[in-house]
Image (cartoon, rainbow, N blue to C red):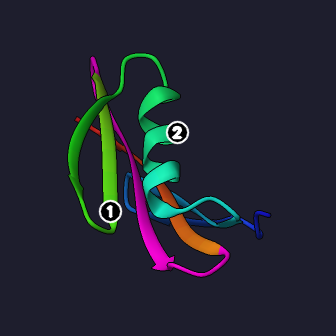
Amino acid sequence: MTTATTLARVGDHLTATWEVSTPMTWREYQGSLRSHSPQGYGELKRDDGHVSFARTLPGDEFEVDVAVGSLGPPLRVRATFSARPY
């Protein structure tokens, strides 16, 4: 289940956030993220409750950040997409 998106703009930086709940465990969800990461995105960092991916194109940088909100069940995560000039 996904809740409404929060969209914020500060100067030239744009951020969109989604709250997601799933019956998967955090370990399963991390594996799914890694195996389904968008083309061109590389993993920036990963720890027990967080994973992020980034992609840089000429003039722009994009980042997807996923953090555990609650281990559940169900697992609840916050996914944040950021775009900014580079």
Residue 50: which numbered mark, if any? 1
Residue placed under numbered mark 2 in the picture: 32
Magenta extent = 57-74
Quarter occupied by the N terminus: bottom right
Q: Earlier in the sequence, mark 1 or mark 2?
A: 2
Q: Relative to 45, is 67 on the left or the right?
A: right
Residue 28: which numbered mark, if any? none
Q: Relative to 38, is 53 on the left or the right?
A: left
From the image, give the main secondary structure of the stretch colored magenta: strand
Above or below 41: residue 44: below
Q: Position of residue 57 (x, y in %)?
A: 31, 20
| Depth order, front residue of 15/80 | 80
The residue drawn where x is 23% and y is 52% is 46
Above or below 47: residue 69: below
Q: Quadrant of residue 55?
A: top left
Residue 15 drawn in magenta: no
The residue drawn where x is 20% and y is 42% is 44
